[in-house]
Image (cartoon, rainbow, N blue to C red):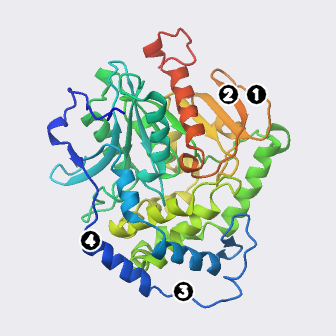
Amino acid sequence: MESFSTIPPHAPLLSSIQPFNLHIADQQLDDFKQALSFGKIAPETYENLQDDGEAEGVGRFGLTRKWLVEAKKVWEGEFDWRETETHINTFNNYKVPIHADDNPSEEFTIHFIGMFSAKPDAIPIVLIHGWPGCFIEFLDLLTHFREKYTEPSNLPYHLIVPSLPGYTLSSGPSLKHDSGKIFMASMMHKLMLGLGFDESHGGYIAQGGDLGSFTANIMGAMYPDCKAVHLNFLIVPKPDGVNDETDLTSAEKAGLKRCEEFMDLGIAYAQEQGTRPATLGLVLSSNPLALLSWIGEKFLAWSDPQCLQPSLNHILSIATLYWFTDTIPRCLYPYRETNRLRKTPPDQSELYKLIMNNEKPKGFSWFPWELHPTPMAYIRERLRNIVWYRRHDEQSAAARVGGGGSGTVEKVRGGHFAALERPEVLAQDVEDFVAEIWSKKTGSSSESTRL
C-alpha cells in the first residue's frame, strides 16, 4: 500500500516540515507503569456505586468505582502502549514550526498527520479534534480512506489531521499571555497555508467537532483561503419564531431534552476547567488514574451507548498519550473563553457574531447522542449559507434546507465523538458535502452551492 507521503512541492514550509516517529522512552514507560501501580482507588461510596446511567460505567453521580477498577486492571495487564505507538506510526506523522500572529518571535511546534494525494486537483481537508480527544480520534477514519482509495493516485483529497496547540504532540500554548480559540484557528490556518493550500491553489475545507467545530468555524469566518466548513457539533441559541412543538422532529425534541439534562447535571466540568484550570491541571497530572477518571467519564457519558466505540482501548490510548505528553495542564485554556461566552448574550459576543455572520458554505452532520444536538430549524435561522446537512437518527424521511442545499436522514446513530463512534459514516458525510459544494472543481452551475 502506498504511503501517501508526498507533500505538495509548492508548500512554503516544505523545508521546515520534519517526518516524525513516535517513540516513548523505555524509562518514561516504566515510570508511567510505576505511577499507575501506585494509584489508589477510592473506597466504595453511595455515589460511586450508582451505575444507573445510560452509558456503561457512568451513573447519575459520575464515573463508577467498578469501571475504574476494571479499567486499571486492563491498563496494567493487557493494554500495550507499544502496539498503540506502532499503529500511530503506520500513518505519516510530521512536525513543523509555526510562528504566532501577534508575536513573530514566538514559535510553536505543530504536529499533524498527512495523507497526501497525487492528484493535481485534490481537495485539501483539515480534520480538527476537540477535548478530551486528540488526533487519535481520526485514525479509524483515515484507515477507511486509506483502504478505500489504496494509493495516492486514487485519493481525491489531501487529508490533514493536526494536533491543536497544547494537545499531545504539539507544543503550546504560550507561557507569556492568554490564548484562546482564535489562536487555535490561526495556528491551524497557518499550517494549511504552509502546506501550500492557500487561495491561489484553490484553498481548503475545514471540518471539526467539539473544540474543532469552533476552530473550523473561525477559520471559515476569518480566512478567504478556507472555502467551506463541515461540522458535527454546533451550539446556537433558539431563534425567535421557532416553535419546538411544530418545527422539530421527535428525535430533535428528545435531543433537546437530553441537552437540558446535560446543562443541569453535566456542565460543571467545563465551569471547573474555565475557572480553575491551574488547580485542575495540577491535580490531574498527579497520577494516571486521576487523569483517566476525568476524561474517561466523558468518553463514556458523551458517546451513543448503542455504539461499540470508543472502546476501552481507545480511551486508554488517548489517556496514555495525554499522560506522556503532559497534555491535561496545557489543553484547558480554551475553556476560560468558553466560560466567558456562556455568560454573554449572543448579540454582544464578538466571537459569536464572527461565526454566525460567516458566509462560507457549510455542512452539518446531526448525531442524536450529541451533547448539544442543535435542531435544524435553529441552525437554518441562525447560521448563514447552510447548504448541506444529514440527520443521523432512526427516522426515514428526507429533508431539504430552505433556500438551497440538500439533506438526507439515515438510520445511523452516534454521539459526541463521531469520528471514533462512526468513522465510516462521518467520512461519507464529508465526502458527500465536498462533492456538493466544491463546484469550483466540478464546474457546477448551481448558484446555491458555488464557492
Q: Nearer the viewer, residue 335 or 45?
A: 45
Name the residue carrying label 3: 41
| Residue at position x 28%, y 65% in the image | 24
Report the number of numbered marks.
4
Q: Nearer the viewer, residue 170 or 175?
A: 170
**Separation (CA) of disc 1 from disc 4:** 54 Å
In the picture, the disc for residue 26 is 4
Name the residue carrying label 2: 407
Element type at marker 2?
strand
Q: Looking at the image, is mark 1 or mark 3 nearer the viewer?
A: 3
**Separation (CA) of disc 2 from disc 4:** 50 Å
Q: Residues within 10 Å of mark 3 (few under 14, many from 20)?
A: few
Q: Earlier in the sequence, mark 2 or mark 1?
A: 1
Element type at marker 3?
loop
How far from the left and from the top, in percent, is residue 322? 39, 65
- What is the three-letter code of the residue carrying label 3? Ile
- What is the three-letter code of the residue carrying label 1? Ala
Name the residue carrying label 1: 398
Q: Residues within 10 Å of mark 1 (few under 14, many from 20)?
A: few
**Separation (CA) of disc 2 from disc 1:** 7 Å
Instruction: Residue 127: name its quadrant.
Output: top left
- What is the three-letter code of the residue carrying label 2? Gly
**Separation (CA) of disc 3 from disc 4:** 26 Å
In the picture, the disc for residue 21 is none
**Mark 2 vs 1: CB contact within 8 A:** yes
Q: Residues within 10 Å of mark 2 (few under 14, many from 20)?
A: some
**Separation (CA) of disc 2 from disc 3:** 48 Å
